Amino acid sequence: MRRTISRVKVLSELYQYDLLNQQINIDNFDELLKEVDDEQIEYDETFAETLFNGVISNLGAIDRMIALCLENYPLDRLSYVDRSLLRIGTYEMMYTKTPHQIIINEIINLSKEYSQDDTKKTAKFNNAVLDSISKRINKK
């Protein structure tokens, strides 16, 4: 549960980062988390910071991997939330040892919760993209 909450906090910061055209100073991540931490919910701060900094530091490679798996659908056409969720999932699959199926399940659950699509089509779309990314990574 703590990692799920950490992913939600990172989702919030990546959304803001993307929305503001990358004008957030990533060195101030702790301050950013405090701004979102109004409910004082326990989460893994180290994991959240590592995840956020990892996504930002590897954004080019992450976006290339996502773009390869979108198939005739431009990355910039995704909503800010879905783009952030896919970036989190892709980062974790590319750069951590967490099993891909766990990552995909987490991102799909967050998609169902935070995407604006009531029909859950977005969650299915994100699932297909992440599954494709997982297969590409496993081929390496």
Image: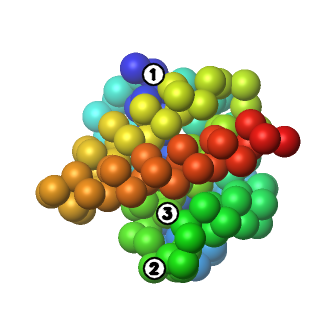
| Residue at the far right in the pictured view | 140
Return the residue nearer the eye: 95 or 10: 95
For mark 2, what is the residue? Answer: 77
Q: Which of the labelled discs sits on residue 2, or is there none?
A: 1
Mark 3 and mark 2 lie on one chain; the one further toward the N terminus is 2
For mark 3, what is the residue? Answer: 83
- Label 1 environment density (alpha carbons within 10 Å; few <14, some 14–19, many ≥20): some
- Residue found at x 59% / y 50%: 132
The image shows residue 3, relative to residue 9, as above or below, that is above
Distance between mark 1 and mark 3 Cα atoms: 22 Å
Q: Which of the labelled discs sits on residue 11, or is there none?
A: none
- Residue found at x 16% / y 56%: 119
Q: Say which amino acid is labelled 1.
A: Arg
- Residue found at x 49% / y 63%: 83
Return the residue nearer the eye: 131 or 98: 131
The C terminus appears in which quarter of the rendering? top right
- Element at label 2: helix
